[in-house]
Amino acid sequence: MMMDRIADMLTRIRNAQTAGIEKIEMPASNTLLSLAELLKEEGYIAAVKAYNHKGHRFLRLTLRYDDDAQPIIREIKRVSKSGRRVYSGADDLPRVKNGYGVAIVSTSQGIMTDKKARAAHIGGEVLCTVF
């Protein structure tokens, strides 16, 4: 049984990029689908596909690499963990690498980037940071 699906997803992305793998698959949930769509929207991954296989939902991500075969995602970290939840107000949301990266926040309005949360004046749980 998987305890932290978000940490598992981020670890799969890190491991696949270290190995130079283009596509990865994992069990899906609504949260992971929202997180993957947000990463696609921000340009960190190329494609997201959710599908069913034998009654189970899966998620297929296509990772992006630059012309030198280096991964687009340089660093991806889980911030709020099951043992230590990290919440921030709208004014206290972290800035990743002086705004070059993205913090992903779970708010009452759904999962969004730190920039969108600041613009909407909404705080929430900081899920992860991506650079």
Image: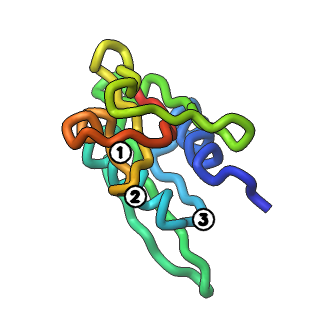
Q: Secondary structure at mark 2?
A: helix
User: Furthest-bottom residue in view?
Assistant: 55
Residue 39: give its label.
Answer: 1
Q: Closer to us: mark 3 or mark 2?
A: 2
- Camera sees residue 4: yes
Q: In the image, residue 102 lies at what x, y percent?
A: 35, 30
Q: CA distance from mark 3 to mark 2?
A: 14 Å
Residue 34: give its label.
Answer: 2
Q: How did the renderer colour the structure?
A: rainbow
| Badge 1 density bin: few <14, some 14–19, many ≥20, Cα 10 Å | many
Q: Closer to us: mark 1 or mark 2?
A: 2
Q: Quadrant of residue 96?
A: top left
Residue 27: give its label.
Answer: 3
User: Furthest-left residue in view?
Assistant: 119
* Dot 1 and dot 3 residues touching (CB under 8 Å): no
Disc with the residue nearer the chain's start (3 vs 2): 3
Disc with the residue nearer the chain's start (1 vs 3): 3
Q: Amino acid at mark 2?
A: Ser
Residue at 31%, 13% in the rendered image: 98
Q: In the image, residue 97 lies at what x, y percent?
A: 36, 14
Front in this rendered view, residue 85 or 56: 85
Residue at 40%, 33% in the rendered image: 89
Q: CA distance from mark 1 to mark 2?
A: 9 Å
* Dot 3 and dot 2 residues touching (CB under 8 Å): no
Q: Amino acid at mark 1?
A: Leu
101 vs 45: above or below: above
Q: Amino acid at mark 3?
A: Pro
Q: Secondary structure at mark 3?
A: strand
Residue 81: give its label.
Answer: none
Image quarter hosting the C terminus: top left
